[in-house]
Image: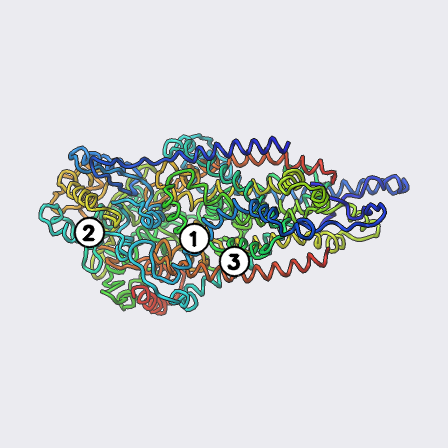
């Protein structure tokens, strides 16, 4: 494992001058070697992403060509135009936003409330409830899909946003994740507030939540991305092709004989990933900010 | 994220007052107001989970004792489905494959995630934000698209990876149809896609560790490895416990990329339990059997996770 | 800051709830024609023609109105079960023929015996093997929408450069021609061009090896017994495994889709495929020819690709009558001819002469070879497992396994699957 923490700047003045130079060079050396290692491994790991990006711009002949190339010899927007003509793609993107966005909003609120109760409030059955919630994570979705579908259909919500979102409006993973996080926050502040007579809701809103922003952001991204990319649920649930999501829509992209037009598929995947990438880039800055203001760096 | 450095001395003003117990003292703990508060906090999530998770699970349990297909006639068959889970050679083989998958996926994904988290946590590394974003990108690609991209890379005829490795003298052949290579390949795709998320969780956990601890250790002359072993690793206990359970559960439910890349083949060498559940339910219309298999999977996962949980809680207690 | 975030959350949450009220589906009309939903997987130009035929049917009468929903075949397979289980399913659904028996066995489709018995249903002249496809335990549960034997597509340009003037008509000719067409110019052991693309698993319509086995005089299932372990099948599998591995006329480890791609990229001179290969070959500028699968020692048989449609159990009496009326309309001579020309598949009625379909040369060619067609695993409910058992057998054989052992394993597995 490489060096973990910086030598504190304060000690530099306490160390005799003749020791400072090698330390600075050592730091540059460590920086450089870290950069090489991380950059090289990142590039390798980025290969499939690059494939998606470049293949989206390749004409059909090049996609199936031998020998294969990474970069397109001829850049074309054909695949992108095909995606929008073969599927109601704009509508699907909108649906994806409503679905993933709706689920994320509700889940963040409901999950954090429940996680707070499990982490901070003392009540009988706390541990049992936690185990039950974790246990529900362990049953694969394929098994409960049909009963959930029947339930939602009985409620009359088939092919509606309500039906798509409701089953995901709270999730065990989020509750578990936030509970672990809340547990790791020190209780001194909220205990003090409790003694002063503040209500739990007040403590939750004003003390715990502000300190949980990175965790909420992480969970938010995780939930949004997972629901945006979810295939089986929107696929099965929306029998109306206009109500599908981007991910379920892409599965309708097969040519005759089951041959998947790879270029078009990559183009569609690229468009599908774009909102997520933008979202992450936006959130990422806040994430870094919240760490920066904590005074740890 | 604020933390109090544990080394800060407690303020003393006269007599020492112990911190109030959570939820108030004495009679307040069980007051109706307190109970109402608890209910209010839990209600929305619990209602959703009960209606859309617990109830379908109960439904599935009931179905597991029948030969239902989801529509049409159904008949009570008792424990027949469960007996079949342990006697059907295809199912037993799927269990073995799932175990192999979990054993390969969990440590590799976690090691990769922790490794990169440690690297990215080092302020001596330039462009940390860039790398963090880049390494997180595989996560935002859907598993099906990832599987698709990897299949294309590994195509024996037109795959870029095969072509490049052939230039280096390595013959990959048809990876996804090779009984020994297919399983590592599907594990690789999952590791590739998931490690970014675990890495971010580790990063958050690492940033919770006060630097003053490292300072003190350096002054004491501890090496990098010693600092990792005695500070980083124990203080990551909570986080590690969480990631291990989550990774294990994900591994035991492996499905998406296997469905896209190998369909369970070749010769069922990548057939996992959830693939079996899916095929029994959706292809062979044996919903009752699929439900029984799901419950067996649930039990296995529960046992494994509880063991993990206890193991890591104990470490947490030791570290605290 | 927190307060503002909370109010933002609240507003968006309210907006989401409002949106939740908007749904995509419309409620059915109370009076008027009986509304019927029809799911099918014809996603290309043929789908548009089918939709037009449905529209014509709607226009021709006032009692029934059919709305079509196009999805891929795989998606239909994934979504039919949940839809039926909550009574949200279609009343008519089309699916690959080998998927029908399992649904029929579980009660998803209604018994159509009376429909077939009726004299005015236009079913009397349907291709008999096509009707076999939809019959389970002696009861018909659907009607065919497509039935075509696998055909051999060959690359005329590559044939010409190898000096071959005609498509092979027997197995020996087939292998001989394939050897001539396999070219390894740089001698590295991997041919740049293969004589034929023979997948060893997930073959086109899962039909390649059943075709070979049948032509060799063997069977897969005989009634309710597995029949795969037979001397004829052993000879067939050994013959082809040798041709692939020793003579290297085809790459190993291919699946049906990869084989399609090998042919369409000009790297294989011959390919066993479905009607869609015609348009794919054309798109890839391949001068192709269509021929029947060459004859084996026992006969000239080709497994058929079949698509069928049926009436689901979620249809009430009025909808069922409407579906049957549509089927009758669909099998009218003129409609059947139109469908055949548009879908590129041979006509489903035996009394439509070749001259009527000559305007589409592909259809004409396929109709000529139609007599070689045999339904794949007719009436076998657990075709999923049987097909994967066959796949395992052929894949392992091509990879070098012992044919006798593999056959006896396949025998017991298939026996278990059909029980």
Name the foreground residue: C210 vs B206.
Answer: B206
Q: CA distance from mark 3 to mark 2?
A: 43 Å
Disc 2 vs disc 1: which is toward the camera?
Answer: 1
Q: Earlier in the sequence, mark 3 or mark 1?
A: 1
On the same chain, marks 3 and 1? The answer is yes
Residue at point 56% right, 61% down? B304
In the image, is residue A255 above or below residue B243?
above
Q: Label 3 belongs to which residue?
A: B101
Q: Is residue B191 left or right of residue C114?
A: right
What chain does badge 2 belong to? C
- Check whether the beta carbons of the residues at disc 2 and disc 1 lie within 8 A of each other: no
On screen, residue B226 versus residue C155, left or right, reads: right
> Measuring 80% from the left and 41% from the top, which residue is drawn there?
A25
Decide: few, some or many residues near mark 3? Use Cα within 10 Å; few <14, some 14-19, many ≥20.
many
- Measured as percent of width and height from the top left, residue C241 is found at 35, 60
Residue nearest the observer in this picture, C130 or A131 = A131
Q: Is residue A27 left or right of residue C222?
A: right
The residue singled out by tag 2 in the image is C130
* Identity of the residue furthest to the left in this view: C119
Residue A80, image quadrant: top left
Instruction: Name the residue carrying label 1.
Output: B56
Q: Position of residue A179 (x, y in %)?
A: 61, 49
């Amino acid at each position: 494992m490489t060096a973990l923490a910086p030598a504190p700047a304060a000690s530099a003045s306490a160390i005799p001058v003749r020791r400072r130079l090698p330390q600075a060079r050592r730091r540059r050396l460590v920086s450089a070697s870290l950069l090489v290692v991380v950059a090289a491994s990142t590039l390798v790991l980025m290969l499939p992403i690059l494939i998606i990006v470049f293949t989206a711009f390749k004409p059909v002949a090049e996609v199936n060509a031998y020998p294969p190339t990474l970069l397109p010899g001829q850049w074309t927007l054909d695949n992108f135009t095909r995606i929008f003509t073969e599927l109601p793609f704009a509508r699907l993107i909108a649906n994806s936003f409503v679905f993933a966005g709706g689920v994320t909003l509700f889940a963040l609120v409901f999950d954090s409330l429940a996680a707070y109760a499990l982490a901070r409030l003392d009540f009988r059955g706390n541990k049992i409830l936690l185990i039950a919630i974790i246990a529900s994570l362990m049953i694969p979705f394929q098994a409960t899909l049909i009963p959930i579908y029947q339930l939602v259909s009985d409620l009359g919500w088939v092919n509606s946003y309500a039906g798509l979102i409701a089953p995901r409006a709270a999730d065990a993973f989020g509750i578990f994740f936030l509970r672990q996080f809340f547990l790791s926050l020190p209780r001194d502040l909220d205990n003090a507030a409790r003694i002063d007579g503040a209500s739990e809701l007040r403590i939750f809103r004003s003390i715990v939540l502000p300190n949980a922003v990175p965790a909420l952001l992480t969970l938010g991204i995780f939930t949004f991305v997972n629901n945006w990319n979810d295939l089986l649920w929107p696929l099965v649930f929306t029998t109306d092709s206009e109500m599908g999501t981007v991910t379920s829509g892409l599965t309708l992209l097969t040519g005759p004989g089951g041959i998947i037009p790879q270029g078009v598929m990559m183009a569609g995947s690229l468009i599908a990933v774009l909102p997520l990438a933008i979202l992450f880039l936006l959130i990422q800055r806040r994430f870094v900010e919240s760490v920066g203001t904590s005074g740890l760096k | 994220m604020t933390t109090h450095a544990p080394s800060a001395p407690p303020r003393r003003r006269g007599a020492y007052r112990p911190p109030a117990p959570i939820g108030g003292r004495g009679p307040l703990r069980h007051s109706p107001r307190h109970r109402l508060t608890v209910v209010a906090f839990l209600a929305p999530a619990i209602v959703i989970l009960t209606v859309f998770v617990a109830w379908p699970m109960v439904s599935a349990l009931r179905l597991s004792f029948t030969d239902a297909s989801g529509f049409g006639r159904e008949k009570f068959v008792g424990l027949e489905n469960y007996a079949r889970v342990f006697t059907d050679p295809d199912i037993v083989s799927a269990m073995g494959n799932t175990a192999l998958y979990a054993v390969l996926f969990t440590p590799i994904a976690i090691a990769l995630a922790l490794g990169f988290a440690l690297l990215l946590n080092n302020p001596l590394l330039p462009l940390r934000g860039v790398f963090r974003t880049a390494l997180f990108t595989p996560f935002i690609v859907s598993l099906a698209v990832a599987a698709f991209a990897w299949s294309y890379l590994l195509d024996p005829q037109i795959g870029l990876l095969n072509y490049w490795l052939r230039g280096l003298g390595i013959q990959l052949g048809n990876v996804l149809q090779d009984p020994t290579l297919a399983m590592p390949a599907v594990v690789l795709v999952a590791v590739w896609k998931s490690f970014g998320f675990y890495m971010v969780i580790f990063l958050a956990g690492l940033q919770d560790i006060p630097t003053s601890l490292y300072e003190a250790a350096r002054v004491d002359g501890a090496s990098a490895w010693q600092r990792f072993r005695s500070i980083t690793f124990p203080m990551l206990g909570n986080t590690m416990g969480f990631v291990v359970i989550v990774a294990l559960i994900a591994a035991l439910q492996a499905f998406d990329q296997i469905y896209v890349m190998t369909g369970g083949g070749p010769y069922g060498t990548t057939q996992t339990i959830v693939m079996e559940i899916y095929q029994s339910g959706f292809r062979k219309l044996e919903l009752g059997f699929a439900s029984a298999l799901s419950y067996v999977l649930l039990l296995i996962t529960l046992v494994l996770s509880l063991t993990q949980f206890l193991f890591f809680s104990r470490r947490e207690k030791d570290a605290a | 800051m927190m307060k503002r975030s909370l109010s933002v959350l609240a507003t968006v949450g309210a907006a989401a709830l409002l949106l939740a009220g908007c749904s995509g589906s419309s409620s059915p009309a109370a009076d008027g024609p009986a509304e019927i939903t029809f799911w099918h997987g014809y996603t290309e130009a043929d789908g548009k023609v089918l939709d037009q035929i449905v529209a014509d049917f709607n226009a021709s009468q006032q009692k029934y109105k059919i709305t079509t929903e196009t999805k891929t075949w795989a998606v239909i397979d994934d979504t039919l079960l949940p839809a039926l289980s909550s009574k949200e399913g279609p009343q008519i659904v089309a699916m690959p023929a080998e998927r029908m028996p399992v649904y029929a066995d579980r009660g998803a489709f209604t018994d159509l015996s009376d429909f077939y018995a009726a004299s005015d249903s236009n079913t009397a002249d349907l291709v008999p093997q096509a009707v076999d496809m939809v019959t389970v335990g002696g009861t018909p549960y659907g009607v065919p929408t497509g039935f075509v034997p696998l055909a051999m597509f060959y690359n005329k340009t590559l044939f010409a450069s190898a000096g071959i003037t005609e498509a092979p008509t027997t197995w020996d000719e087939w292998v001989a021609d394939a050897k001539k067409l396999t070219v390894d110019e740089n001698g590295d052991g991997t041919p740049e061009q293969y004589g034929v693309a023979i997948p060893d698993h997930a073959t086109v319509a899962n039909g390649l090896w059943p075709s070979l086995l049948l032509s060799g005089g063997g069977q897969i299932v005989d009634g309710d017994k597995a029949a795969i372990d037979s001397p004829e099948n052993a000879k067939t599998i050994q013959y082809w495994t040798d041709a692939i591995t020793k003579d290297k006329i085809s790459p190993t480890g291919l699946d049906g889709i990869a084989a399609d791609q090998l042919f369409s990229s000009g790297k294989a001179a011959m390919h066993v495929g479905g009607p869609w290969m015609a348009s794919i070959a054309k798109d890839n500028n391949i001068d192709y020819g269509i021929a029947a699968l060459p004859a084996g020692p026992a006969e000239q048989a080709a497994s058929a690709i079949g698509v069928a449609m049926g009436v689901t159990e979620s249809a009430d009496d009025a909808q069922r009558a409407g579906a049957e009326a549509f089927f009758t309309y669909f099998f009218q001579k003129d409609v059947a001819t139109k469908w055949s020309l548009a879908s590129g598949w041979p006509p489903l009625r035996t009394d439509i002469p070749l001259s009527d379909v000559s305007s589409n040369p592909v259809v004409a060619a396929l109709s000529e070879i139609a007599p070689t067609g045999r339904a794949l695993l007719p009436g076998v409910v657990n075709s999923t497992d049987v097909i994967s058992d066959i796949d395992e057998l052929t894949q392992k054989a091509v990879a070098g396994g012992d044919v006798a052992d593999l056959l006896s394993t396949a025998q017991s597995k298939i026996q278990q699957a059909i029980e």
